[in-house]
């Protein structure tokens, strides 16, 4: 199976850059996804890393290193609306189907 | 983009009754859908994988006779919580794969009184 570890809370100020790390132990690991979830809402997809390296999507970037079983989500030019929980999730293939295993989530608080 | 819908958005039911939650992929076909449960301030926990035309695959510790899953078509999966109890009160979220990306429904908040 899989387990993913990420910090429980991070606080940063508006305009800053924050990095949320995720380490994983897994069998059948296929890739790492990141999701954002605001209180009371459903998760929304941010990014996916199937290969090592950096993926950039606007203010958000995500990185994966398979050799280190490690990834991170980088949020730049933080805005108040970025206050949310961020989950890393391992895409796992077992047999003929894949599913996501989520980390416990990192609650990001952006201060003015 | 791809959209997954859920119905109802929230439901309150009495202990001992059954509740059905629907999950639909609106603009793509999904042979596989996933059902998650999320308790307050906790992560999403995969309950089961719903497979069109065959039996669902349940995660360890999830009672298949209590959480009935039916995936009758390529766009619809249903989760029925049978004989609901207050401890079943939770946020239930479905999702469907499209390529490497998993799209989530808006969730159903179940409160059992």
Image (cartoon, coloured by chain):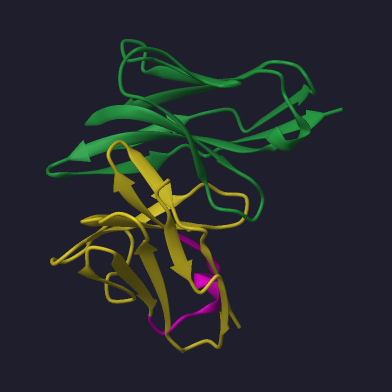
Residue B5 left/right relative to A42: left
In the rendered image, the quadrant that contains the C terminus of chain B is: bottom right
In the rendered structure, which segment of residues is drawn in magenta?
B82-93
Q: Position of residue B74 (x, y in %)?
A: 22, 63
Q: Is residue B66 above or below residue B6?
A: below
The answer to whether residue A3 is above or below residue B16 is: above
Q: Quadrant of residue A93?
A: top left
Q: Is residue B59 visible?
A: no
Chain assigned yellow: B
Within the image, what quadrant is residue B98 found in? top left
Could you tell me which residue is drawn at 33 percent across and 63 percent down? B62
Residue A80 visible in the picture: yes
The location of residue B8, given as percent across then percent down, is 51, 74
Q: Is residue A57 left or right of residue B74?
A: right
Looking at the image, is A18 positioned above or below residue B86?
above
Q: Quadrant of the N terminus of chain B?
A: top left
* Residue at 55% over, 37% down: A105
Q: Nearer the viewer, residue B76 or A29?
A: B76
- Palette colour of chain A: green
> Which of the 4 image quarters holds residue B71?
bottom left
Vertical arrangement, residue B65 with respect to residue A112, above or below: below
């Amino acid at each position: 199976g899989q387990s993913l570890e990420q910090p429980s809370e991070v606080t940063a100020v508006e305009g800053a850059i924050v990095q949320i790390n995720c380490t994983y132990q897994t069998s059948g690991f296929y890739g790492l996804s990141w999701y954002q979830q605001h209180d009371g809402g459903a998760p929304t997809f941010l990014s996916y890393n199937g290969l090592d390296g950096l993926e950039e999507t606007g203010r958000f970037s995500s990185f994966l290193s398979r050799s280190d079983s490690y990834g991170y989500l980088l949020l730049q030019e933080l805005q108040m609306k970025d206050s949310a929980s961020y989950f890393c999730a391992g895409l796992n293939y077992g047999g003929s189907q894949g599913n996501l295993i989520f980390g416990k989530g990192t609650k990001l608080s952006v201060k003015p | 983009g791809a959209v997954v819908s859920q119905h109802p958005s929230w439901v309150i039911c009495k202990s001992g009754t059954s509740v059905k939650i629907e999950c639909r992929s609106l603009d793509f076909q999904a042979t596989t859908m996933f059902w998650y449960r999320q308790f307050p301030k906790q992560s999403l926990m995969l309950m089961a994988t719903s497979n069109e035309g065959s039996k669902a695959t349940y995660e360890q510790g999830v009672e298949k006779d209590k959480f009935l899953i039916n995936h009758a078509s390529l766009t619809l999966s249903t989760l029925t919580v049978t004989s609901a109890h207050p401890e079943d009160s939770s946020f239930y979220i479905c999702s469907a794969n499209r390529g490497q990306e998993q799209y989530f429904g808006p969730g159903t908040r179940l409160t059992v009184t």
